[in-house]
Every structure is written in structure tokens, then in C-alpha cells.
């Protein structure tokens, strides 16, 4: 009787296990999402907009850490802060005032830089209307199974976003570009994030399906800066992006955090402005959309020790003593950099550097004192 009971339990377990494997395999091949892309755009020039470049590079670093390769990232930076002559630490861009996390790094691949960052080029990247001579690195080669993250930061107003301080893109133009992408089957799902003043006005005109949008501020509100650095005279980041990245540092490729968790990032008590989001165009529950569906490149893979025949009904595999002794090894994800610790550290003491013109002014003062004391007749003792 005991043997019969054990056999029944074994048969039930094997049957359930086989059904579970079959279901997972079916979900894998029926999924509409097979690849991820990111378009990250900083639209601002000039040194006082340092924070916008840092915003974009910080998001760039996060999506790369979570698995999206450079070949699937289109990075557009309107100015090169790393090589600006005002930068006291050339070839670096920092997103925190402790100056320990260089988000520029050695492996940044900027696809559009300087005056290449225009409204026309941005819209051409989205819609795929680029000249045949355009290299692959400057193209968004997505398809109808692609999940796309689009991040914009810069200066904006009610219904527009400025590019290069010389032109602007309206919310109608952006909405029409997304509709072209949908009609041309260039995305499966799209996440739009914008960190700018009155950012919510940019998604008011959206009408394409399977699109979700987030903004750092409502209409009539300013999106405020964060992390002032007195040594270089500018702010290092914007508030919304700062707390967004702080949230992303706790995300790893196997994380189960969903979009509802992302909506809670940077409440008004932290951002001062009121972040907003729009989900009515999204075709599934935001709670079922994982953060890694857009910020990562996670393949839906089911690891099993059994052989699965995809053309015939799945056969039950008997357990052997060898299989029973196999133990599953547990894996854990580690941060590439201890960012969670870095962002909470106090700023360390920096080497003091005289401000511009200090040495020249000092010599001028010395000469004035000398002339006032000794007059012009003793000038020969100096030269």
C-alpha cells in the first residue's frame, strides 16, 4: 500500500512538472517581446546644462548594466561636457557631488553629438527615415517584437521641448512620430520618460497603442535640479532622474519589480514638482510589466535538465537516484559598482584650485602696491 501511494505521488509530481515545463515553453514562443532598444537624448547645450548630460549618461549606464548592449542603444548628446574647458576633471562627467562615480567612463558610445542632435535627426531615428549611407550604429533597427525605452531631458514648456536652444519639438510632432512607428511595426511596447519643465504636456497628445509615458512635472510646474557643486558652479543632476536612478540601482536582471513601483519614484516631497504618468494607451496592466521589460534585456529562458521535443508531445522523464542527488546552485546578482553606497557618502575633501584670473589679479595687485610705494623710477629692479 505504501509503495502504491509513493508511486501515485511520484506520477502526480512528474505530470505536474511536465505540464509546467510545457506551459513555460509555450509562453516563451508566444511572447511578443524578444528584444530591447533604448533612445536616450540630451537636448541642451552649454556648461550650465551640465546636469542634462549627466542625466542621460546615468540612464545610459543603468540600461547597459541591466543588459542592453551598445548596439541597441542610440545615445544623443547635444554637448560634450567631458571635454569642456571649464571641466576641472577632463574626460569625466559626475552625477553625484562626491565625485566618485564617473558616468562618462571608458566605454561610452555617443551616436549623435553636438549639432547632430536636432529635431529632424531625432524624428528620423524614430521613424527609420534615414539616408542609406547612415551607419547601423545611428539607426533604430527595431521591429514589432521590440520594447523601446525613450528618455528625453532638457528645457521645455507647455507642449514643447527645446533642442540646442535654437529649435523645438512639439507634443503633436512627437505623437505623430510614435504613430508612424506603430504603423510601420517598429515597436511592440514603448516606454516614454521625459525630465523637463511641464513634462506632462508632452504626452497629452499621444494616441498610439501600447505606449506608456512618465514625466517629472505637471503642466505649469518646473522640474527642479539637484546636487549643486560649488567647485564647478553647476548642478549635477535633476531631481526626478536622481531618484529614478536610485531606484534602478536596486534592480537586477531577475528583479520582479513592475511599472507600478516605478510610478512611486520621486514623490512630491522629494521632487517638489508632481511627477505624472499615463497608462490608458497601454494594452496590459502596468503591474504585469516588469521594469526589466524596458530597462533591461532579459531573455525568457526556462532552465531544465530534461530534453524537450518541440514537435511531439512532451514525454514524462523518470527520476533516477543520480538526478535526485543533483542540487540546484543558487545564483545572485552583484552590482558592477557600489553605487548604492556611493550616493549616500559624504563629499570628500577636494584639492583646492584657484579660480580663473586669480593669479593675474594677484600680480596686478603686487604691481600696484609697488608703484604706489616706490614709483616708476624703481621699475628697472623688476625687469
Image (spheres, helix red, strand yellow):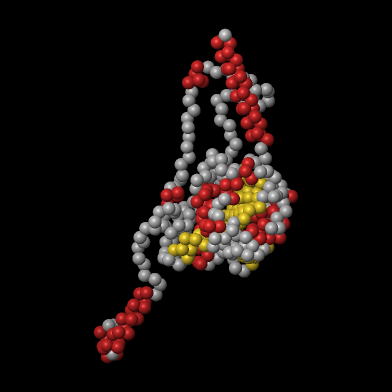
**Residue at point 61%, 27% (across, down):** 21
Q: Can residue 113 be seen in this view?
A: no
The relative height of residue 200 versus residue 339 in the rendered view (above or below) is below
Query: Which residue ends up furthest to the front in the rendered image?
Result: 269
Q: What is the count of numbered marks?
A: 0
Task: Using the image as rendered, state which of residue 220 and residue 254 is in the foreground.
Answer: 220
Q: Position of residue 344 (x, y in %)?
A: 43, 53
Indicate the quadrant containing the N terminus: top left, top right, bottom left or bottom right: top right
The relative height of residue 25 versus residue 116 in the rendered view (above or below) is above
**Residue at point 56%, 40% (across, down):** 256
Indicate the quadrant containing the C terminus: top left, top right, bottom left or bottom right: bottom left
Kindly indicate the quadrant of the structure image that contains residue 257: top right
Q: Position of residue 165 (x, y in %)?
A: 60, 68
Q: Position of residue 33 (x, y in %)?
A: 65, 41
Task: Using the image as rendered, state which of residue 83 and residue 32 is in the foreground.
Answer: 32
Q: Where is residue 251 in the image (x, y as percent from the top left)?
A: 52, 44
Q: Can residue 208 be seen in this view?
A: yes
Q: Is residue 299 left or right of residue 347?
A: right
Q: In this view, does 339 lie to the left or right of 77?
A: left
Kindly indicate the quadrant of the structure image that contains residue 97: bottom left
The relative height of residue 302 versus residue 45 in the rendered view (above or below) is above
**Residue at point 62%, 21% (across, down):** 15
**Residue at point 67%, 40% (across, down):** 32
Query: Which residue ends up furthest to the right in the rendered image?
Result: 183
Task: Using the image as rendered, state which of residue 250 and residue 361 is in the foreground.
Answer: 250
Amino acid at each position: 500500500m505504501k509503495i502504491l501511494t509513493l508511486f501515485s505521488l511520484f506520477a502526480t509530481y512528474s505530470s505536474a512538472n511536465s505540464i509546467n515545463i510545457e506551459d513555460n515553453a509555450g509562453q516563451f514562443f508566444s511572447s511578443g517581446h524578444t528584444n530591447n532598444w533604448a533612445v536616450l537624448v540630451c537636448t541642451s547645450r552649454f556648461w550650465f546644462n551640465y546636469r542634462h548630460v549627466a542625466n542621460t549618461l546615468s540612464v545610459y549606464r543603468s540600461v547597459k548594466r541591466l543588459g542592453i548592449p551598445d548596439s541597441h542603444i542610440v545615445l544623443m548628446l547635444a554637448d560634450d561636457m567631458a571635454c569642456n574647458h571649464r571641466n576641472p576633471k577632463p574626460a569625466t562627467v559626475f552625477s553625484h557631488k562626491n565625485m566618485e562615480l564617473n558616468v562618462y567612463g571608458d566605454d561610452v558610445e555617443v551616436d549623435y553629438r553636438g549639432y547632430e542632435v536636432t529635431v529632424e535627426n531625432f524624428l528620423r531615428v524614430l521613424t527609420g527615415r534615414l539616408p542609406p549611407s547612415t551607419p547601423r550604429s545611428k539607426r533604430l533597427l527595431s521591429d514589432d517584437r521590440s520594447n523601446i525605452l525613450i528618455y528625453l531631458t532638457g528645457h521645455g514648456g507647455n507642449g514643447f521641448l527645446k533642442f540646442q536652444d535654437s529649435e523645438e519639438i512639439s507634443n503633436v510632432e512627437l505623437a505623430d512620430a510614435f504613430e508612424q512607428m506603430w504603423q510601420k511595426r517598429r515597436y511592440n511596447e514603448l516606454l516614454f520618460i521625459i525630465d523637463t519643465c511641464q513634462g506632462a504636456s508632452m504626452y497629452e497628445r499621444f494616441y498610439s497603442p501600447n505606449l506608456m509615458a512618465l514625466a517629472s512635472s505637471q503642466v505649469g510646474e518646473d522640474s527642479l535640479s539637484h546636487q549643486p557643486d560649488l567647485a564647478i558652479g553647476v548642478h549635477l543632476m535633476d531631481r526626478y532622474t536622481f531618484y529614478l536612478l536610485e531606484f534602478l540601482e536596486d534592480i537586477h536582471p531577475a528583479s520582479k519589480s513592475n511599472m507600478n513601483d516605478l510610478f512611486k519614484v520621486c514623490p512630491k516631497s522629494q521632487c517638489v514638482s508632481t511627477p505624472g504618468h499615463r497608462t490608458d494607451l497601454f494594452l496590459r496592466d502596468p503591474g504585469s510589466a516588469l521594469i526589466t521589460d524596458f530597462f533591461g534585456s532579459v531573455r525568457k529562458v526556462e532552465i531544465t535538465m530534461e530534453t524537450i521535443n518541440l514537435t511531439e508531445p512532451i514525454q514524462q522523464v523518470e527520476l533516477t537516484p543520480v538526478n535526485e542527488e543533483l542540487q540546484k546552485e543558487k545564483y545572485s546578482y552583484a552590482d558592477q559598482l557600489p553605487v548604492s553606497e556611493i550616493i549616500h557618502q559624504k563629499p570628500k575633501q577636494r584639492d583646492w584650485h584657484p579660480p580663473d584670473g586669480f593669479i593675474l589679479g594677484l600680480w596686478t595687485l603686487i604691481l600696484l602696491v609697488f608703484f604706489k610705494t616706490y614709483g616708476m623710477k624703481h621699475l628697472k629692479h623688476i625687469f
